[in-house]
Structures are given as structure tokens and as C-alpha cells.
């Protein structure tokens, strides 16, 4: 209950809003035509800049067959075709997602990745959305808003640090996996013919879903392949399965690896068939 002689908070806010409306009416400018004119001019400037940059990119990189060798002011018109069978490309997000990218290095799959990718960002977003409804004061001087200033500074610093860490992070996953290959060879007594396939298995992203000798992740229920060779599926079956998993095993969520080419698929198949567990 409001004390005698003291206005209620809601009445004070209503009075402040009324004074604000009167002040806008007395000293402000109507939206039409002033704000609409400014928005129109700014939109034309932005579109003109985009068209100008596109024109410069197009006509300064023009060359025979558009082979990507003729470097223009803003880069080549086309670059070399992507190799879908590459084993060295490391996908990275755009720079403005680096802070989330690095959070995945802090919150590991599968126990805490949900917290890092959905929990923390969404909680912060909800707090940002409800903040204007919680803090309804008209005070805007930074010196009198220490909590808001500290929160803003910490947010900017944390995102800046995470962005920088994400931009400079070394992709160590593939190297960590390939470092395990000698131990696989020794434990499973793999023949020399299976070694190229073991190295290919380590760098092709197979351990993103499968585990092998304790290395990797069992994402989406993918099986452990340490002793897949004991099933005696055969080289032909392994190649066909790698080319089109859902064709061999209907409903399989495993992606196709046909882009690796027949030679490398055979190397993988030989490795899998020779994987019969520690001996």
C-alpha cells in the first residue's frame, strides 16, 4: 500500500509518460515526412553501396573461363571447385559465431553441450528481452546505473574473449585422433595393408559419430567399430555401405562417403575388415 501523501509507483510512471508525450509534442518532429525521408535516404545509400561493391567485384575479376586465377580488387569471381572428398578441410563458422564455436570446446559432448549451445545463450537472451520491463526508471546516466554498466561491460568482454579464442583456436581434433593410430595398429595387430585405411579413418571425421579403441564419440547411437571385422561383412559390403549407408541399411542416418572415391573407400573397407579387436 502507498503511504499517505506519496504517489504509487504506477501513478508516477504514468505521470512521467504523460510528460514525455507532451515534451515530444512540443519539441519533436512527426514521423512523416521527417523520419520516413531519413529512412529512405539511408536505404538508398546502403543499396547503392551493395550494388557498387558487386559491380567492382564482377568486372575487376573477369578473366578467361572465370578460372579464379584473375584476382580482382575484391577477390576472384570464382575459386577452384570444392572437393567433396577432402580429408583436410576443417569447417569453421562465420566470425560472428566464433564465441559459440568456442563454447563447444568448453562444454563437451554429450553431457554439457546443450548447456553451452542452448542454455546459456537463451537464458541471456531472455534476460535481455525482459530487462526493459524490469528496469522502468527514466534515469539514463551511466554513473547512476552501476549494475547495468557492469553487466554490459562483462558481456562485451566475455564475447570479445570467446570470439578471439574461437578465431585463434587450433583444430586439434584430427591430429589427436591420428595420433591414436599407432596404438590401434599395435593393439589390433593390423597388417600393413590396413594402415592407410586407419589413417584415413582418423582424418575423415568417422570418430565424430563412431568410437574406435576408446577414441571418438558415440553420437546418434553409432556403434563402436573396434571389432567390426569379426562380423565378416566383406570388402564389397563395406564399400557399398560407405558409398550409400541408407541403401544398404534403410533408415540409416549415416551420411554418404562416395565422394572419397573408390580407392580410398577400399582402404577404409580393408581397415574395417581387419578390425577384430585387441589381440
Image: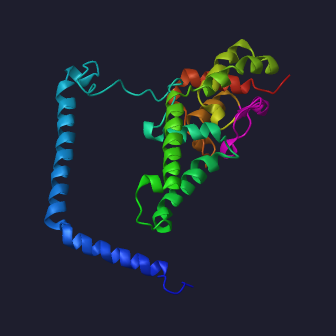
Foreground of the two, 38 or 135 = 135
Q: Position of residue 234 (x, y in %)?
A: 70, 29
Q: Where is residue 61 in the image (x, y as percent from the top left)?
A: 21, 24
Q: State the residue at coordinates (63%, 22%).
A: 175
Q: Where is residue 136 in the image (x, y as percent from the top left)?
A: 45, 68
On whether residue 225 falls in the magenta region, the answer is yes
Visual colour scheme: rainbow
Q: Which residue lies furthest to the bottom in this view?
A: 4
Foreground of the two, 55 or 271 = 55
Q: State the residue at coordinates (23%, 24%).
A: 73
On the rendered structure, is 232 left or right of 164?
right
Q: State the residue at coordinates (35%, 23%).
A: 80
Foreground of the two, 179 or 163 = 163
On whether residue 125 falls in the magenta region, the answer is no
The answer to which image quadrant residue 218 occupies is top right
Quarter occupied by the N terminus: bottom right
On the rendered structure, is 249 left or right of 11?
right
Quarter occupied by the C terminus: top right
On the rendered structure, is 166 left or right of 183?
left
| 71 versus 116 height, above or below | above
The residues colored magenta run 211-233
On the rendered structure, is 60 left or right of 254?
left
Q: Residue furthest front?
A: 5
Q: Can residue 214 be seen in this view?
A: yes
Q: State the residue at coordinates (61%, 22%).
A: 200
Amino acid at each position: 500500500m502507498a503511504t499517505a501523501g506519496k504517489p504509487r509507483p504506477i501513478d508516477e510512471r504514468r505521470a512521467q509518460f504523460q510528460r514525455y508525450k507532451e515534451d515530444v509534442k512540443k519539441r519533436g518532429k512527426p514521423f512523416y515526412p521527417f523520419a520516413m525521408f531519413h529512412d529512405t535516404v539511408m536505404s538508398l545509400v546502403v543499396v547503392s553501396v551493395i550494388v557498387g561493391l558487386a559491380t567492382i567485384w564482377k568486372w575487376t575479376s573477369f578473366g578467361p573461363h572465370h578460372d579464379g586465377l584473375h584476382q580482382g580488387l575484391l577477390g576472384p569471381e570464382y575459386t577452384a571447385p570444392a572437393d567433396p572428398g577432402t580429408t583436410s578441410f576443417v569447417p569453421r563458422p562465420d566470425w560472428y559465431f566464433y564465441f559459440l564455436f568456442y563454447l563447444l570446446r568448453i562444454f563437451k559432448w554429450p553431457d554439457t553441450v546443450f548447456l553451452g549451445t542452448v542454455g546459456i545463450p537463451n537464458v541471456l537472451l531472455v534476460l535481455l528481452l525482459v530487462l526493459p520491463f524490469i528496469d522502468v526508471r527514466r534515469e539514463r546516466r551511466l554513473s547512476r546505473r552501476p549494475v547495468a554498466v557492469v553487466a554490459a561491460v562483462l558481456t562485451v568482454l566475455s564475447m570479445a574473449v570467446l570470439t578471439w579464442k574461437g578465431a585463434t583456436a587450433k583444430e586439434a581434433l584430427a591430429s589427436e585422433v591420428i595420433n591414436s593410430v599407432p596404438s590401434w595398429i599395435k593393439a589390433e595387430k593390423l597388417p600393413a595393408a590396413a594402415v592407410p585405411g586407419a589413417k584415413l579413418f582418423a582424418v575423415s571425421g568417422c570418430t565424430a559419430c563412431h568410437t574406435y579403441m576408446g577414441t571418438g564419440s558415440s553420437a546418434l547411437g553409432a556403434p563402436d567399430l573396434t571389432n567390426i571385422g569379426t562380423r565378416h561383412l566383406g570388402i564389397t559390403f563395406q564399400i557399398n555401405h560407405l558409398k550409400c549407408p541408407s541403401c544398404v541399411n534403410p533408415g540409416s542416418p549415416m551420411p554418404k562417403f562416395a565422394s572419397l572415391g573408390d580407392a580410398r573407400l577400399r582402404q577404409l573397407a580393408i581397415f574395417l575388415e581387419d578390425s577384430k579387436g585387441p589381440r
